[in-house]
């Protein structure tokens, strides 16, 4: 085996070891009262429980553990802990807020949502709508569709540009490939966009009918 090849594989091995080490260091840790350790990513916290995702869980399933079972827990990323705490407070702000007659959500022409003359995110609107099962269902559906639209944009844009970075391919083939990707993205994205607006508007109407 040529020396260059040996060096290359050694480099790959070192990178792999470093990656594994960094992955372990970046893990959050939950220690149960029976002293068993759970390396994971903590994604939610309140006064009762911790929400987490197990490491190497490809399905990214969110699990929960009651704080009464936990001896202690640590965040590997302090900044992430601060963001999570802020997110928890914001969620509590809208889920525990007392609403009265006239507390409606306004959907403007740009598709933004306003509540009490303040712009709110789609996630915050979802928290507000927990009080109305039908509105919540439609808002959750709208948010899922919006994520799908964003995913299509993320994967289609590089594919459209990619052929023009290659050599040895005719401009006609490049245009054909990019055009095909664009047509597919539009044929999927446009119906999703229509469905998103439909569910968003329905969610707002259902919620507002409760507080008018």
Image (cartoon, rainbow, N blue to C red):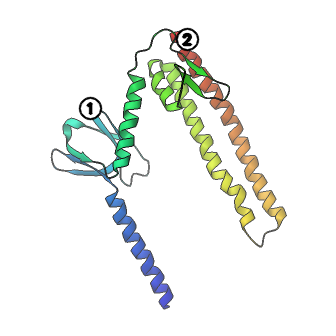
Name the residue at 82% across, 68% down: 170
Q: Nearer the viewer, residue 189 or 103?
A: 103
Other residues around mark 2 within 10 Å, as few (<14) / some (14–19) / many (≥20): few
Q: Which residue is mark 1?
A: 48
- Indicate the secondary structure of the residue bearing disc 1: loop
Q: Residue furthest left?
A: 34
Residue 62 shows in this picture: no
Q: Where is residue 93? Give x, y as percent.
A: 40, 25
Identify the image quadrant of the C terminus: top right
Q: Rounded to the nearest whole Å, what is the CA distance between mark 2 and mark 1?
A: 33 Å
Name the spot of residue 95 as percent of width and height, x first: 40, 24
The answer to which image quadrant residue 21 occupies is bottom left
Question: In the figure, 68 relative to 205: above or below?
Answer: below
Mark 2 sits on what residue? 209
Residue 158 appears anywhere in the view: yes
Q: Is residue 145 above or below residue 157?
A: above
Residue at the front extreme, as displayed:
117
Kindly indicate the quadrant of the structure image that contains residue 204. top right
Q: Residue at x 84, y 62 (%)?
A: 172
Residue 66 pos. (x, y %): 25, 36
> Where residue 25 sits in the image (x, y, percent)?
32, 59
Q: Determine whether, in the image, residue 88 is placed left or right of residue 141.
A: left
Give the residue at the far bottom of this rendering.
Answer: 2
Considering only order in the chain, which callout, 1 or 2, is on the residue closer to the N terminus? 1
Crowding at dot 1, Cα within 10 Å, few <14 / some 14-19 / many 20+, comes out as few
Q: Residue at x 66, y 29 (%)?
A: 110
Which residue does the image show at 43% across and 24% down from the upper left? 94
Element on which disc 2 rests: helix
């Amino acid at each position: 085996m040529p020396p260059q090849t040996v060096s290359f594989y050694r480099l790959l091995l070192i990178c792999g070891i470093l990656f594994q080490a960094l992955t372990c260091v970046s893990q959050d840790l939950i220690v149960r009262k029976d002293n068993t350790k759970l390396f994971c990513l903590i994604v939610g916290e309140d006064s009762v429980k911790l929400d987490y995702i197990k490491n190497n869980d490809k399905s990214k399933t969110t699990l929960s553990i009651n704080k009464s079972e936990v001896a202690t827990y640590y965040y590997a990323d302090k900044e992430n802990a601060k963001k999570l705490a802020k997110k928890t407070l914001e969620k509590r702000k809208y889920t525990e807020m007392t609403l009265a007659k006239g507390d409606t959500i306004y959907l403007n022409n740009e598709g933004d949502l306003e509540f009490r003359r303040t712009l709110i995110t789609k996630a915050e609107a979802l928290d507000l709508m927990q009080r109305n099962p039908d509105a919540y269902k439609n808002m959750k559906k709208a948010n899922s569709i919006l994520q799908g639209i964003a995913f299509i944009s993320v994967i289609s844009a590089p594919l459209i540009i990619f052929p023009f970075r290659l050599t040895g391919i005719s401009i006609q083939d490049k245009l054909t490939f990019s055009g095909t990707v664009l047509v597919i993205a539009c044929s999927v994205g446009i119906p999703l966009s229509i469905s998103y607006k439909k569910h968003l508007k329905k969610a707002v109407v259902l919620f507002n009918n409760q507080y008018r």
